[in-house]
Amino acid sequence: MRLLARVGSLNAVVTVLTGISALYMLLVVFGNVTDYGSNEAFVKHVLAMDTTFKSPKTMWRAITSPAIVTVVYVLIIAWEALTALVLASAFVTWLRGRTQTAARLSSTGWLMQVILFLGGFITIGGEWFVMWQSEQWNGLTAALQNVIIGAFGLVLVHLAQRQNAPTSAEPVEATV
């Protein structure tokens, strides 16, 4: 019964979700590096706005410079890699029972995920570069799924932090 209580605890849930999120982000980075051309094409077409409605009122925003496309794409991959590393560190820290540090790392990693996908893909790509107008290069659904994962993780980890908050008689680091 103690094992069941431990496995079903909020800390265990956050630990598993952190690990899966870290693995997911690592696979995203792996895909972007090993299939560089396909994913770079996505960034290129979104920035060029070449499959949108081509309204003169928005087309001035288009970026077609190959150098800028490369910089943007490399920055996206670097951000994803850093997010994966933060989440992987959080996962290991959860496994070690350092709940407060693990919670901060998980929160940071999921916030980074939300910043990239809500700030970068939905806000900048979707609205500034009107990606929503493109039938072929529209990544809004995938971006939204990432925002939901990150936001769900943030809610859970902050609930876990409230649950793990030390009382005056408890040590700062609680065990999982």
Image (tube, helix red, strand yellow):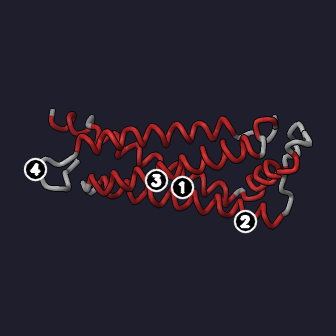
Where is mark 2, residue-wise? Answer: 71
Q: Reading the chain from its start, which is encountered first: label 3 or label 2?
A: 2
54, above or below 171, in the image: above
Report how far apart the C-alphas of labels 3 and 1 lie in the structure: 12 Å
Q: Earlier in the sequence, mark 3 or mark 4?
A: 3
> What amino acid type should be assigned to the residue bearing mark 4?
Ser
- What residue sits 29% from the left and 38% below the top? 10
Q: Which quadrant of the rendered structure holds the N terminus?
A: top left
Left or right of residue 6: residue 85: right
Q: Residues within 10 Å of mark 4 (few under 14, many from 20)?
A: few
Name which residue lies at 27% across and 52% down.
99
Closer to the camera: disc 1 or disc 4?
Answer: 4
Structural crowding at the residue carrying mark 3, measured as other residues with C-alpha within 10 Å and reported as few (<14), some (14–19) or many (≥20): many
- For label 1, the crowd category at 10 Å Cα-Cα, with few meaning under 14, some 14 to 19 and many 20 or more, is many
Choose between 57 and 166: the one closer to the eye.
57
Q: Which residue does the numbered mark 4 point to in the structure image?
A: 168
Q: Which residue is mark 3?
A: 109
x, y percent for residue 140? 68, 38
Asked whether the beta carbons under mark 3 and mark 4 sit within 8 Å of each other, the answer is: no
Residue type at the position of mark 1: Leu
Q: Which numbered disc flags the more N-terminal residue, 2 or 4?
A: 2
All told, the count of numbered labels is 4
Tell me which numbered mark, 3 or 1, is placed earlier along the sequence: 1
What x and y, as percent, mark residue 164?
22, 45
Direction from residue 97 to residue 127 in the image, left or right: right
User: Which tag is nearer the camera, tag 2 or tag 4?
Assistant: 4
